[in-house]
Amino acid sequence: MTAARWASMAEPVRRPLGTVSSRILKGVKTDGLPKRPVGDYAIIQFQTRFALPADTIETVMLVRERTGWFVAGYTIVPDVKP
């Protein structure tokens, strides 16, 4: 996926949330994904504060292919605190 395509796909999801006011790295996971060898992917999570809703968790999944790393998925969910 090219950077331009990534931006065009993410923009309609993120636009309604407003401006990002902060983004903190929560963690990176590279193991435990079914049917994927360790190191062939990375799941990166951020605690992100948008204008609306205030706190969310952004998850980006990257997959390593022969020519480099590529975005395979992106989600935004509310950060529900216990």
Image: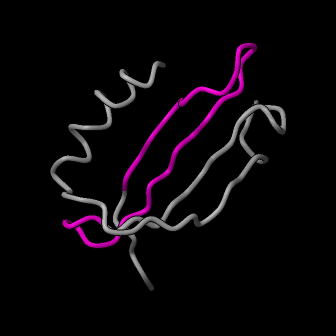
Q: Position of residue 1 (x, y in %)?
A: 48, 19
Q: Residue at x 44, y 41 (%)?
A: 74
Asked if residue 20 lies left or right of residue 79, the reply is left
The overriding secondary structure of the stretch rendered in magenta is strand
Q: Residue at x 55, y 57 (%)?
A: 45
Give residue 78's quadrant in the image. Answer: bottom left
Magenta segment: does it hold 55?
A: yes
Asked if residue 78 lies left or right of residue 36, the reply is left
Q: Which residues are magenta?
A: 50-76
Q: Is residue 75 above or below residue 41?
A: below
Residue lying farthest to the left in this orientation:
16
Q: Position of residue 50 (x, y in %)?
A: 27, 64
Magenta segment: does it hold 39?
A: no
Q: Residue at x 31, y 68 (%)?
A: 21
Give residue 61's quadrant in the image. Answer: top right
Q: Is residue 81 above or below residue 4?
A: below
Colour scheme in the image? one colour
Q: Position of residue 51 (x, y in %)?
A: 20, 67
Q: Residue at x 52, y 44 (%)?
A: 60
